[in-house]
Image (spheres, helix red, strand yellow):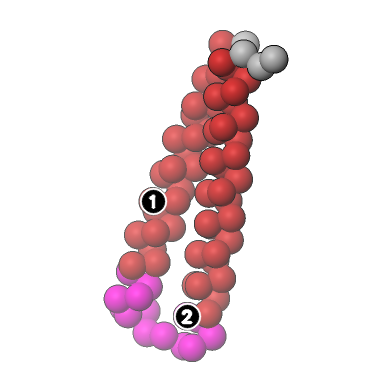
Amino acid sequence: MMNLKQTKFIGLTMELDLKVREYKMLCDKLNELKENKIEPNDERLLALQELFQQNHDEIEKINAQLKEIEEKG
């Protein structure tokens, strides 16, 4: 039987996996926009940039929580 720390660690790892998949989807969207030779100031790029930043922030938060769990051992 897993303890609370192990359960939380697994949950965070799964959440991190989802965020990595989301990042890959964002990269695909960016490549799609690049292929269409979209203007650098296009609103779609700005929206995508915001999504990248949000994804990055969430990944950092999850990594910090994982690190905290590992340090408490």
Q: Which mark is residue 54?
A: 1
- Residue 41 to residue 59: above or below: below
Q: Which mark is residue 28?
A: none
Within 10 angstroms of label 1, few (less than 14), some, or many (20 or more) residues?
few
Counting every numbered tag in the picture gives 2
Q: Nearer the viewer, residue 56 or 40?
A: 56
The furthest residue to the top: 72
**Image location (x, y in percent) of residue 22:** 53, 57
Q: Which residue is mark 2?
A: 33
Magenta part of the chain = 33-46
Quadrant of the drawing holding the C terminus = top right
Amino acid type shown at disc 2 = Leu
**Mark 1 falls on what kind of element?**
helix
Residue 50, x across and y down, in percent = 35, 59
Residue extending furthest toward the right: 1
At a point 66% along the width and 16% down the height, the residue shown is 2
Q: Residues within 10 Å of mark 2 (few under 14, many from 20)?
A: some
Q: Is residue 48 left or right of residue 35?
A: left
Q: Is residue 36 magenta?
A: yes
x, y percent for residue 54:
38, 51
Q: CA distance from mark 1 to mark 2?
A: 19 Å
In the current view of this chain or complex, which residue is farthest to the bottom? 36
Q: Is residue 50 left or right of residue 35?
A: left
Position in image of residue 65 (x %, y %): 49, 27
* Front in this rendered view, residue 15 or 1: 1
* Quadrant containing the N terminus in the rendered view: top right
Q: Is residue 71 visible?
A: no
Kind of element beneath mark 2 = helix
Q: Is residue 50 magenta?
A: no
Identify the image quadrant of residue 61: top left
Q: Is residue 62 above or below residue 71?
A: below
